[in-house]
Amino acid sequence: MKAIETTGKIDDRGMLCIDRPLAFANHSHVRIIVLVPEDTDIDPDDDPIETVLEGIQQGFHEAITGQTLPLFQL
């Protein structure tokens, strides 16, 4: 069995909604293990995935448009 880690949310009806589609054949059976954070598991320094992705996209845009500096100038 292969393991894939992803994130998601539980909606108002108690249904699991994952953040991204999985790249598997449709109608595959899967086993799901749900890990729910406890209050003590929350890391205030942990950025949400959306924030991280926005930073990566901005960095990529700056790189392809030449808005970067060589390391020796930093």
Image (tube, rainbow, N blue to C red):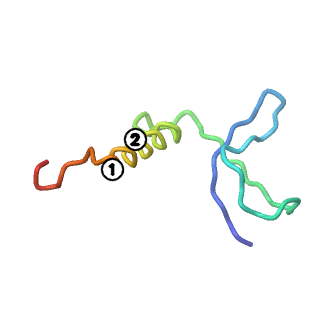
Check disc 2 and report the residue beneath it: 58
- Which of discs 2 and 1 lies nearer the camera? The answer is 1
Label 2: element kind: helix
Pointers 2 and 1 in contact (C-beta within 8 Å):
no
The residue at which mark 1 appears reads as: 63
Image position of 67 (left or right of 48): left
Q: Is residue 16 visible?
A: yes
25 in relation to 52, above or below: below
Q: Measuring 77% from the left and 41% from the top, which residue is drawn there?
A: 16
Q: Nearer the viewer, residue 54 or 17?
A: 54
Checking the image for residue 21, the label placed there is none
Looking at the picture, how far across and down is residue 70, in whole percent?
Answer: 17, 54
Q: Amino acid at mark 2?
A: Gln
Residue in the foreground of this view, choosing between 59 and 29: 59
**Structural crowding at the residue carrying mark 1, measured as other residues with C-alpha within 10 Å and reported as few (<14), some (14–19) or many (≥20):** few
Residue 33 at x, y percent in the picture: 73, 54
Residue 14 horizontal side relative to residue 4, left or right:
right
In what element is the residue under mark 1?
Answer: helix
How packed mark 2 is, by other alpha carbons closer than 10 Å (few <14, some 14-19, many 20 or more), is few
- Residue at the spot x=79%, y=27% of the render? 12
Instruction: Quote the CA–CA distance across marks 2 and 1.
Output: 9 Å
First along the sequence among labels 2 and 1 = 2
Identify the image quadrant of the N terminus.
Answer: bottom right
User: What x and y, as percent, mark residue 72?
Assistant: 11, 55
Name the amino acid, label 1. Answer: Ala
Return the residue found at the far top.
12
Q: Is residue 41 visible?
A: no
Query: Residue placed at 81% from the left, 64% from the top?
Result: 25
Whether residue 69 is situated above or below residue 46 in the rendered picture? below
Query: Looking at the image, which residue is at 66% across and 61% down?
Result: 4
**Image spot of residue 42 (x, y percent):** 50, 37
Task: Indicate the quadrant where residue 5 lies.
Answer: bottom right
